Amino acid sequence: MASFFRYRDERIAIGIVERLKRLLSGHLRFMHVCGTHQDTIVRFGLDIMLKEAGIEVIPGPGCPVCVTTPYEIEIAVNLANNGKIIATFGDMFRVKGVKSSLADARASGASVFIVYSVSDAIAIASEHKKKDVVFFSIGFETTAPATASAVLNGVPENFSILSAHRLIPPAMSALIEMGEMRIDGFINPGHVSSIIGVGAYEHISKRYGVPQVIAGFEPIDVMYAVYMLVSQIMRGEACVENEYRRVVRYDGNKKAREVMNAVFRAVDVAWRGFPVIKSSGLQLKRTYEDKDALKRYEDEIDEIEQNLTELMEKQSSEATCRCGDVLRGIISPAECPLFGRACSPHRPIGPCMVSREGSCNILYRYRKSGRL
Amino acid sequence: MCLGIPARIVKVKGERKSLADFGGGVMREIDISLVDVREGEYVIVHAGFAISVIDEEEAEETMKIWRLFSDTETSELR
């Protein structure tokens, strides 16, 4: 294996910043859409280095847990309270729905399991044959093929999927369409891209004239991706380039995409902080209806929905949490009045502070004060 | 969520499963149904599934480009 030390070589990072300083005079704003990128950027202080060259790198809606709506979470919570076993990824556990979280449900006696993989959730179903097991399945194109692969391979009778999967490119287009801010370029998520490939983003550059670079997750990956974006802008081009060539092929992972497309279909869905985004969510195809929790528990969910509508009308207190604005890149976490005061990873209010991929959690973890 | 961890394929066990070495003495069974991979190759693992095979030649190429930035007075960068 190639030696990994260069991925974090500070001299290279400094060399890139120096070159950028010489190239640039104005201010540029790039957005990334991946919690893991945000972790790398804040942990290694890349945002601070780039600021010196007049470049701002801001996080967008790149945290699957964060963009899941309170409504979807509340359905999972209610199914748990109604006696189903819910299995989901760890970050989802403490995020509040409309009223409560899966953690609350477990505290009051419901069965909620944290799993690392869909395979673990299936194992739980095999062990608890007399109970219904629902896998609350979240994640972008990186995760959806795994869920799909499990379904194709056959799952136990008592197992179903509550899908909150989402797709990245539609959200990027939506951000530009909303036009709340200028975005000079996108740093695209490496692992989502390893599945969907370079071509999946090309329509965005063509339509909106915005440059994009797919990047890996080591500090130099991100720094070099920024350099590539600036070079594109200097050349007056807007296209999709691939910095993460060791992992991302032009066509992505065809096998994974076939599996994903065999099981899921794209649907219009709302994201936290966003209105409904066209074809940005994944639901199970009719062929797999018997594995779809939304179908299997249709009557039960209808009832939950009715109660939810009443609840949501009463509630507007969430307005103080600005997670939605953080997800759209409108404010940085430190600009939220709750950050580090009423809201911290120990007592989180919004999902951006709960999830380790949330921008608030990351900023708090590496720079408690929130000062940049 | 989209965290991917590199691991080496140690022992393929049938069509779906393989033992993978994550380094530091961590071995875990992963699902390889989404990739075509051989023993000895490196993969990116996400949520228990290998999602991509790492191309070592591309990794070397990338490093070569980066190296130019650490040489203080390099004139020719692409």
Image (cartoon, coloured by chain):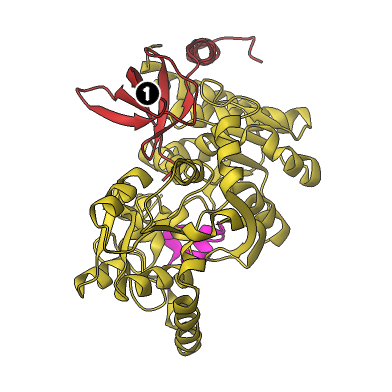
Chain colours: A yellow, B red
Circle 1: residue type: Gly
Q: In which quarter of the image is residue A5?
A: top left
Residue at the image point whose x is 38% and y is 40% from the top: B47
Q: Is residue A352 above or below residue A81?
A: above
> The disc numbered 1 marks a residue on which chain?
B
Q: Horizontally, is A108 left or right of A350 in the view?
A: left
Which one is in front, A141 or A145?
A145
Residue at the image point whose x is 47% and y is 47% from the top: A151
Q: Horizontally, is A334 left or right of A18 in the view?
A: left
Q: Is residue A188 magenta-colored? A: no
Residue A298 position in % (x across, y down): 50, 73
Q: Is residue A333 magenta-colored? A: yes
Q: Is residue B53 above or below residue A64?
A: above
Magenta stretch in the rendered image: A321-336
Q: What element carries label 1?
A: loop
Whether residue A253 is visible, yes or no, is: no
Q: Quadrant of the N terminus of chain A?
A: top left
> Count the marks: how many?
1
Residue at the image point whose x is 45% and y is 54% from the top: A138
Residue A159 position in % (x across, y down): 38, 56
Residue A39 position in % (x across, y down): 40, 42
Which one is in front, B8 or A24?
B8
Q: Horizontally, is B15 left or right of A201 in the view?
A: left
Residue A218 position in % (x across, y down): 43, 29
Q: Mark 1 points at which residue?
A: B14
Whether residue A36 is visible, yes or no, is: yes
> Mark 1 packing: few (<14 Cα in 10 Å), some, or many (20+)?
few
Q: Horizontally, is A5 left or right of A286 in the view?
A: left
Q: In which quarter of the image is residue B21?
A: top left
